[in-house]
Amino acid sequence: MNGVAMGTVEKPLIDRAAAASGVRRLLVLGGGLILLAAVLALFGHAYGAIALVIIFGALAIAGIAAIFATALGFVQFTGRIAEGAIAKDFLDTARTGTLIVDRKGRIIYANRAYGEATGATTAASVKTLERLLAREPEASEAIYALANLARENRAGHREFRLPRSLSGSEAAPAAHWYRASVRPLATSSGMLQAWQILDITADRKHEESSFQDLQHAIDYLDKAPAGFFAADADHRIAYLNATLAGWLDVDLSEFKPFSRSILEFVPEVSHALLSPRANASDPDVPTVIDLDLVTERGQSLPVRLLRRSAEGDAAAPGIVRTLVLNRGGDNEAPGSLEVVEARFTRFFNSSPMAIAALDEHGRVVRANAVFGQLFGQEAAAGGAEIERSLREGGREGLRQALAAATTGRAGIPAIDAEIEGEPPRSVRLYISAVPKAGGDTDEAAILYGVDITEQRVLEDQYAKSQKMQAIGNLAGGIAHDFNNVLTIITASVDFLLLNHRTGDPSFQDLLLIKQSANRAASLVRQLLAYSRRQTMRPKMLSLTDVIADMHLLLKRVSGDNTKLERHHERDLWPVMADIGQFEQVITNLVQNARDAMPGGGKITISTRNVPADEARRFGYGELTEGDYVLVEVADTGTGMPAEVAERIFEPFFTTKEIGKGTGLGLSMVYGIVKQSGGFIFVESTQGEGTAFRIFLPRHIPAQVAAIKSDAGSVAVSNAKMDLSGTASILLVEDEDHVRAGNVRALKMRGYEVHEAASGIEALEVMEELEGRIDLVVSDVVMPEMDGPTLLREMRQKRPDLKFIFVSGYAEDAFAKNLPEGEKFGFLAKPFSLRDLAVSVKTMLDE
């Protein structure tokens, strides 16, 4: 049924509901009259006949009155009938075939559309959908599911395809699609089921046609000779056509929308070209960008991008659509002006150097992407003079260079400047004049800018490292020479104390000399710590345990006016360090923090693990790649200016009053941390406080060999030990006074002592004695031949020869020059006569 003529109403094939309603009303009226007559009959025939006459008379009068009232318009009976008639007319003329059945499956109603859909022309030929389609393989499952829903008083719908039309009106059978539905219908007479069926073949054909059109459009776009992609505001690719995917070597079968960014295929120097601000031109005019893309295989792909944002597109808000033209040599006409211009623009945009054309006032006429990244997009847009982007120190030089360029001068010197911002960036600017070749152009000069921030940082670090190394070498050299002097003083005092008793008037003076020499030796050790030449005995430590054991000591060091707090991360990685030296580092830093808070405050000691990726985020250029354990000592003191923080680790540099500090405390801390393979940095803000951060490398036990333990290098303290002997000893020392004192001390113990002033002389003595030497005690640093070389020469003839090295430097400073596994003893300068005797006795007894 395609429509209904105006003024006509289609009659349904079956409508038993209206007939049943009229019959029921007549039966009710007849039943009422029969019941009334039966009641009257109980009172006798006479009264019953009179009552019947009266009733019929009354009904006749009422009927005549109703007719006149209806004719005159005083009474209307159309309201309720009209409501039902509208609904019924709508159902009768509906395009959807409708069938209403009761619970027993008897047909109550079927409209004309149902008959047309199912091929029924008379009431007798109308069948339910269950009977009609139960044997159709394509529809039986759908109808069975709907029948189950109907029995459960539930609604639902299904779509199915038949190889022919249900109406049977087609000459040539063709496939048809149908939509069938069922829903419960509650009425006053009980629960009914409303079935509907609609032929949707035309809709399906339209959908299939639209889908085919869409597939064709996508296929045309995918295989177009130009690339295309759509990306959101974050540059994530929403769509990528097959042409561009092939150029970029992207596998479309694995590509997922919004999973990748177009910036992955754009060199970093050109990222700024794709920013929204760089494309903020007229939205109706595509933005043209010439640049090089980078394929998955790392190949360069010269392209031209035509970009337009989808402003006001509700279906794709914020999406930017971009057409990509391959500008490779095979796709361009050689020699054309457009090709040359595009190639220049591509090189201009892809250059890692910031390039901009300036007018005579220093405003940007045009600039590449790197310029925008370095100087900011506002400067690249040409809204203000370029000099406003620089700090004051570089503005005058830029003005002079620009003035020289506008006059056409060549060979303008480069300018080093800093760009405004935090942190500031260092740049080197080159200005060249633009030749006046005619034409309407505002370009007066070309500016080239190179970011040298990292270079400056490296230069500063190298200069600082060289400075610290030079100071360290100086300190180490002073310490070495001073150790020899202290050794002579200590040995001489020891000899004098052997001849003076406690009651002797000179005894206290000699004791004071010895104490002063020991104090001087302590200062020398601090210098050696800074120069990283002191003796270290590292072992695996848990810094949490070490600092916890020091808590009582640190409480006393910090003082009563200072609050000391400790914060430790769980499962702290182990480190390799000398526990005694590390305790000295922490004690010194806490003491330094206490002195920075004369009015009291808070000192916080914290430890935590710092993985390699987090270590990079600290931004310390000197910090090498790796995992670290961080120890931080922070205070809430007065802080210090930057110029003081720069020199805080230098020996003898101090901000304290004269007599209240040697200036060696923090330099010793620096040296110990460096000798432990770590790094130390200071951050301070005046009025807020200071924080020292120590980074010690994470120790993995499986990667570190066992630590060598030399019994000869440990001084045995035993007052009852017999230090005498008769062995033959060769003493090698280039300092005459030191050698004389040591020879005298060993002879007093009964040893046979031979002496030599150099390594070469020691070999000669060894040859004269035909190798009859039990022990060699040698200095490390000597002219002509040093101690390690002497050891190698002597071991060639006497592999079992025992050896003790004497030095003011750390054992590790020279041990690395010896063969692996070499055995020797070690005695650190300055030493007492007893220290020398104990070392000799211990080595001989091994």
Image (spheres, rainbow, N blue to C red):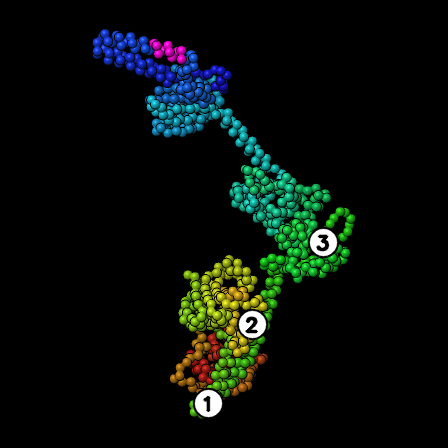
**Majority secondary structure in the magenta region:** helix
Q: Which residues are magenta?
A: 60-69
Seen from the viewer's position, the closer of residues 161 and 712 is 161
Identity, as a three-letter code, of the amino acid under mark 1: Phe
Query: Mark 3 = which residue?
Result: 361
* On screen, residue 7 above or below 179: above
Mark 2 lies on a secondary structure that is loop
Q: Earlier in the sequence, mark 1 or mark 2?
A: 1
Q: Is residue 648 left or right of residue 343?
A: left
**Residue nearest the observer in this picture, 382 or 809:** 382
Labelled disc at residue 627:
none
- The residue shown at (42%, 79%) is 716
Does the segment drawn in magenta span residue 227? no
Secondary structure at numbered mark 3: loop
Q: Give residue 468's position: percent from left, percent from top.
A: 57, 70
Asked where in the image residue 621 lies, by quadrant, the reply is bottom right
What percent of the width, then of the height, locates residue 219? 57, 35
The image shows residue 286, relative to residue 679, as above or below, that is: above
Amino acid type of the residue that numbered disc 3 sits on in the rendered structure = His
Disc 3 residue crowd, few under 14, some 14–19, many 20+, Cα 10 Å? some
The numbered disc on residue 507 is 1
Tag 2: amino acid: Glu
Q: Can residue 233 be seen in the rendering of this structure? A: yes
Tally the numbered discs: 3
Q: Nearer the viewer, residue 305 or 162?
A: 305
Spatial CA span between label 1 and label 3: 86 Å
Above/below status of 417 relative to 775:
above
Check disc 1 and report its element: helix, strand or loop. Answer: helix
Q: Which residue is mark 2?
A: 650
Quadrant of res 127: top left
- Local packing at callout 1 (Cα closer than 10 Å; few below 14, some 14-19, many 20+) is some
Please give the name of the residue rendered at 50% of the width and 25% of the height, measured from the top-left corner: 202
